[in-house]
């Protein structure tokens, strides 16, 4: 089973499926970008420069903060103005300060530019060597890993990556719910022309719809009750019935849905075969196939109801609530795809002793489903987060202190690392359980810094830091972020000014 883009490309290489240039695009990309010019430029470069260009990334000019830009994918790029060769590529999420390698200013280019006005379309034109390079390096799991690896080793391997920037077209990846909302809205508003709802571009028989002013689309067999309004930017699928006095705006409703009276839908995404009773309010939420929403229910912003869930009656779900027929305790034992499974047996464990009742306080008296996430943290969740922080700090301190407890403070850096490395390898799974989010990594690094400053063993720190990075306990981006945050005390400044730490920071 493929777990990453890297696994796919390694399999492609093993089966020799690619023998010429190919286009690499994620399955959740929605685009009408014309790539013919980019493809021509890519082939010309490979012909003129003896195949040293292995990839051409396609980006679109887009101002920072534009709704089509995903914060997780925001990048800053340094590139040669003439050749469009990428010199530096870095994601900016969570960073307050940016650092650029000095060598890019000595790359032999007379003109270069640093840009933060680019939207990554996640479309790349690749040479056949790309699959081979993924095979040669199992650390490459994502395209981002590949780009960083090529740029770091450019002088050694002689490979280059270029960029094609377009001002026209639409190319956005639906990587999270906010982008799902943004792209769906753009499709209905016809920003992705000629990919429009009435064009039936997925070629489903009997699923065509008519287009009318204010971007209202109606499929065949739609019935609309007396007094109901479709304000603007609304798509209603085939054979869907809508009751009286409903107000619908900026929403998409699938096929074979039944909607009662006095229902208010705003930025709602209702999939197929959904039943919504009367007096329901849904705002900026996703309702999956075969869900039943009973009378008097309110879904506040950013709620998700997975397949077959039943909610209500007369209940209001807080903002950010996610409800699934799978219990959260099953998360570790089941594949991610099963979270949104439409299996009729969901909610019933194979081991009947594990069957858990639905909580009426969470999903309503007649509801079926389990709460997975709510945006507001209750006291229990706050306590759990506090305990995790305590666990990260204590774990880091205890492991780093252990060699000194065993052999005394007279250890040399080499002796200390020799004793510590087996411990780090043994406890790496525990670290990875506690250290998952960006903030977790920063907490771990703070404990790391505090330990070595307290012990006044600054010279030990770089080797330990490198080992924690190589064991994948800490990530490169968070280490660089910690280093760039600056020091708050004289000792912290001494740690960062240490030649070993500076050298390791540059090496990362």
Image (spheres, grey):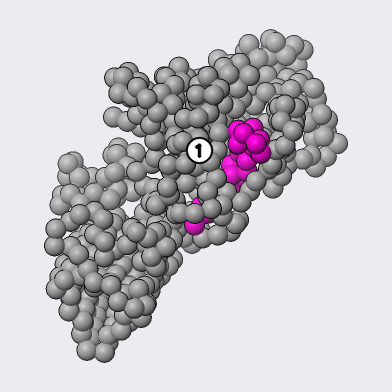
Q: What element carries label 1?
A: strand
Residue 433 visible in the current orientation: no
Q: Residue 89: x and y, percent?
A: 60, 37
Name which residue lies at 61% across and 51% down. 117
Residue 440 painted magenta: no
Figure quadrant of the C terminus: top right
Q: Is residue 395 left or right of residue 225?
A: right
Q: Foreground residue, 238 or 454? A: 238
Q: Name the residue under label 1.
A: 57
Vertical relation: 327 (above or below) 238 = above
Is residue 239 shown above or below 48?
below
Q: Nearer the viewer, residue 485 or 445?
A: 485
Q: Residues within 10 Å of mark 1 (few under 14, many from 20)?
A: many
* Quadrant where the N terminus is found in the figure: top left
Q: Is residue 321 left or right of residue 275?
A: right
Quadrant in the rendering for residue 313: bottom left
Quadrant location of residue 476?
top right
Up/down of 338 relative to 293, above or below = above
Residue at the spot 28% in from the left edge and 50% down from the top edge: 340
Residue 490 on image: x %, y %:
86, 36
Q: In this view, does 367 lie to the left or right of 450?
A: left
* Residue beneath the point at 23% across and 83% down: 261
Residue at x-position 22% and y-position 68%: 209
Magenta residue span: 68-93
């Amino acid at each position: 089973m493929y777990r990453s883009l890297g696994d796919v490309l390694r399999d492609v290489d093993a089966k020799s499926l690619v023998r010429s240039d190919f286009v690499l695009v994620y399955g959740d990309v929605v685009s009408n970008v014309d790539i013919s010019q980019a493809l021509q430029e890519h082939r010309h470069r490979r012909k003129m420069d003896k195949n040293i260009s292995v990839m051409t990334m396609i980006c679109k000019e887009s101002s920072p903060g534009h709704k089509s830009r995903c914060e997780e994918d925001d990048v800053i790029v340094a590139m040669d103005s003439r050749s469009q060769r990428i010199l530096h590529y870095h994601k900016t999420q969570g960073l307050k300060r940016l650092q650029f390698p000095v060598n890019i200013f000595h790359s032999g280019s007379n003109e270069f530019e640093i840009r933060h006005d680019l939207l990554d379309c996640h479309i790349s034109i690749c040479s056949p060597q790309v699959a081979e390079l993924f095979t040669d390096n199992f650390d490459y799991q994502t395209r981002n890993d590949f780009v960083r690896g090529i740029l770091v080793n450019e002088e050694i391997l002689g490979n280059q990556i270029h960029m094609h920037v377009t001002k026209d077209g639409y190319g956005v990846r639906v990587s999270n719910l906010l982008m799902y909302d943004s792209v769906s809205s753009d499709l209905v508003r016809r920003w992705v022309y000629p990919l429009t709802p009435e064009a039936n571009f997925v070629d489903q028989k009997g699923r065509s719809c008519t287009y009318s002013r204010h971007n209202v689309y109606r499929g065949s067999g739609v019935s609309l009750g007396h007094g109901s309004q479709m304000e603007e930017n609304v798509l209603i699928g085939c054979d869907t019935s809508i009751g009286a006095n409903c107000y619908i705006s900026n929403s998409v409703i699938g096929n074979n849905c039944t909607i009662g009276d006095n229902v208010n839908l705003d930025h709602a995404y209702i999939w197929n075969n959904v039943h919504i009773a009367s007096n329901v309010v849904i705002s900026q939420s996703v309702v999956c196939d075969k869900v039943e929403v009973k009378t008097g229910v309110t879904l506040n912003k950013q709620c998700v109801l997975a397949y077959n869930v039943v909610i209500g009656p007369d209940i209001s779900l807080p903002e950010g609530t996610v409800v699934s027929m799978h219990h959260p305790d099953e998360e570790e034992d089941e594949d991610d795809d099963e979270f949104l499974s439409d299996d009729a047996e969901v909610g019933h464990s194979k081991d009947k002793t594990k069957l858990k009742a639905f909580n009426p306080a969470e999903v309503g008296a007649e509801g079926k489903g389990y709460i997975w996430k709510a945006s507001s943290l209750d006291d229990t969740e706050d306590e759990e987060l506090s305990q995790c922080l305590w666990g990260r700090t204590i774990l880091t301190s205890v492991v780093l202190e252990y060699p000194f407890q065993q052999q005394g403070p007279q250890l040399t850096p080499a002796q200390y690392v020799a004793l510590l490395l087996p411990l780090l390898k043994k406890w790496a799974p525990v670290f990875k359980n506690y250290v998952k989010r960006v903030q977790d990594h920063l907490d771990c690094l703070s404990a790391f810094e505090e330990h070595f400053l307290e012990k006044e063993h600054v010279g030990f720190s770089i080797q330990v830091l490198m080992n924690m990075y190589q064991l994948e306990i800490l990530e490169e981006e968070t280490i660089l972020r910690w280093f760039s945050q600056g020091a708050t005390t004289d000792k912290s400044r001494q740690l960062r000014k240490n030649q070993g730490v500076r050298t390791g920071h540059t090496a990362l």
